[in-house]
Image: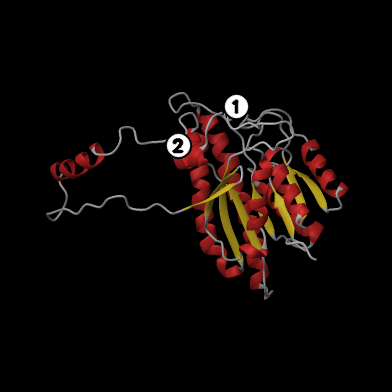
Amino acid sequence: MSLPLEGLSAIVTGAGRGLGRAEALELARLGAAVVVNDYGQPGRDGSGAASAAPAEEVATEIRAAGGRAVAHLGDVSDFEAARALIDLAVAEFGKLDVLVNNAGILRDRMVFSMSEDEWDSVIRVHLKGHFNTTHFAAVHWRGRAKAGESGVYGRIVNTSSEAFLAGSAGQPNYAAAKGGIVGLTTSSALALARYGVTANAICPRARTRMTEDVFAGFAEPTAEGDLDPLSPEHVAPLVGYLASPAAAGVNGQLLVVHGGMVAVVDRPKVAAKFDTAKEAFTYEELDGLLTPHYASRPAGETFAASEVLGLKKG
């Protein structure tokens, strides 16, 4: 019996640790040959010297289990490094079929305290990093289709966050980047569908070195040996599914995933609609319509990311 991803090749960025590692291992378990990308810096803020060790360790683990894998040390926010990453997959495995964008850093600060560099660095790694790899993967797939190849297969799985959905007071840079990634995903989905490519985004919850303080005390294992409800292993199977032929009809979607739960997020809907009684709105008319509307809603109707879809402490 063949495996779902047998004969396919994949790239997973930020795959040396945490979520990316779990995703790379899952894709390999499902039969894909994997390029394990990681810049290998020890700090979750992107600090420290780059190291090939994290990516090499995951690639070695995949090969030890009988899979095919190669490590790549590279910063996906660098345009040429992203080009080299896609080129490596093609050189090693003949083609690229799956791109999983996961690499990221955190530099948390309230908006009134955030420096320009703290803003720029997070936007660069998350949003520009997603664009860079998506761009070169898209060039690869479109080129094959334009050359007359039939049945081009492409899957993009991007990593957004509930920080974009629900807000995160101390992460304006991260929330903005993750919102931008959703826009990039839906645009790419529309542009690339004609070439046999799908693009989807996930909002994962997982306890990793990037989030260990965020999820401290949340839904911890109840007994020794139990799988952590916030383990990255709960997220990886969804990535495997979205990378597979079974998900051919899933495109431009956003899904929240954690601890045995997947939620399909609908696109924004209009909550209320008002039409002017005259040719154009005036301040007074808007005051008479919008002020009562918002006054009738619960005070402070915003939610912390931990409260969206029912994550509880305990």
SS class, disc 2 = loop
Q: Quadrant of residue 105?
A: top right
> Is residue 191 visible to us here?
yes
The furthest residue to the front: 223
The percent coordinates of residue 175 (x first, y second) are: 49, 38
Image location (x, y in percent) of residue 243? 66, 58
- Foreground label between 1 and 2: 1
Q: Position of residue 119 (x, y in %)?
A: 52, 33
Secondary structure at numbered mark 1: loop
Residue occupying the point 64% across, 46% down: 235
Instruction: Evaluate whether residue 176 shows in this view.
Output: no
125 vs 184, left or right, is right
Which picture quadrant has residue 31? bottom right
Say which of 164 and 115 sits in front.
164
The numbered disc on residue 167 is: 2
Residue occupied by mark 1: 216
- Tell me where residue 287 appears, x and y as whole percent: 17, 40
Question: Among all residues in the image, which is located at the extreme left?
Answer: 278
Marks 2 and 1: in contact by CB < 8 Å?
no
| Identity, as a three-letter code, of the amino acid under mark 1 | Ala
Q: Nearer the viewer, residue 49 or 288?
A: 288
Of mark 1 and mark 2, the one earlier in the sequence is: 2
Residue visible at 65% across and 44% down in the picture: 234
Q: Which kind of residue does numbered mark 2 sit on?
A: Gly
Q: Is residue 19 left or right of residue 268?
A: right
Q: How far is mark 1 from mark 2, CA to CA? A: 19 Å
